[in-house]
Amino acid sequence: MRLKHVKGAEEIVENSKYVIKDYTEHKGSFNKLFNNNNPIRIEIGMGKGNFIIENAIKYPNINFIGIEKYDSVMVKAIRRLDTLDLPNLRLIRMDAGKIEEVFDHEIDEVYLNFSDPWPKDRHAKRRLTSPKFLNKYKTIFKDKEIITFKTDNRKLFEYSVISFNTQGFTIENLSLDLYNDDIKDNIPTEYEMKFHSKGFPIYKIRVYK
C-alpha cells in the first residue's frame, strides 16, 4: 500500500511532546519515563491512533505506548493529541523489527491490530505474529506474556492462531465475528470501523503464557 505523503509530518512528529525521540535510552526503565509503576501496554502498528488514544483516556492508571513506522501516519494521531492531555500515553516512531532493542522485561501486554498480512509465503517471517516476532516479544514482557490480536484477514488470523499454538500460548478468548459476539469494552481501530461498516467479520484472539 502506498502511503500518502503529509507535508511537514516529520517536523510535527519530531516536535510532539508525546513522541519519545531517544527511546533506546529508556530500555528497561520506561516506568521512570511515566514516573510511576503502573502496567505498560504497547500497540505495534498504531496507525492513526484511535485505539491507543481511547485506551489511554479510558484507563488512566495504565501506561500506553503506540508504535508506528511512518511519520505520515503517526502525524494524524498527534494532531488529535494536541487537544488532549494524556500523561499515560507516549508514542515511538520505529520499525517493529527492532522491538527487542527498545524494551527489556517491562511490558504487560502487546496489542497487534490489523497488522500487514504479508500474504506471500516468502514474506511470512515479516508477519507480526510469526514465530520470529513472537520470540522477539519474549524479551520485552515483564512477567506473563499477553498478546491481543485483531484482524479482518481470515488467512492471517488462521496463520496467527497456529503460530500462537506452536509457540506454547494458551487461548484466553477467541472470536470469529467480534461484532456478533457478546463483546464488552471493545475499542475499535480506524481499519476496524471501516471494515465492520462494510460487513466484514472482525477476528480477535487474546493469548497468554
Image: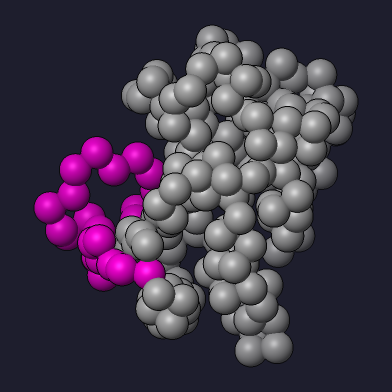
Q: Is 73 rendered above or below residue 122?
A: above
The extreme left residue here reads 182
- Magenta stretch: residue 52 in it? no
The quarter of the picture where residue 25 lies is top right
Query: In x, y percent, where is residue 31?
Result: 58, 25
The residue closer to the viewer here, 44 or 70, is 44
Judged left or right of residue 153, residue 200 is left
Residue at 83% x, 25% y is 14
Q: Quadrant of the C terminus?
A: bottom left
Residue at 35% x, 40% y is 187
Q: Which residues are magenta?
A: 169-198
Residue at 72% x, 26% y is 19
Query: In x, y percent, where is residue 49?
Result: 55, 36
- Magenta stretch: residue 181 in it? yes
Judged left or right of residue 41, residue 97 is right
Q: Is 55 rendered above or below residue 125?
A: above
The quarter of the picture where residue 38 lies is top left
The extreme bottom residue here reads 121
Q: Is 120 rendered above or below residue 133?
A: below
Query: In x, y percent, where is residue 168?
Result: 40, 75
* Whether residue 8 can be seen here: yes
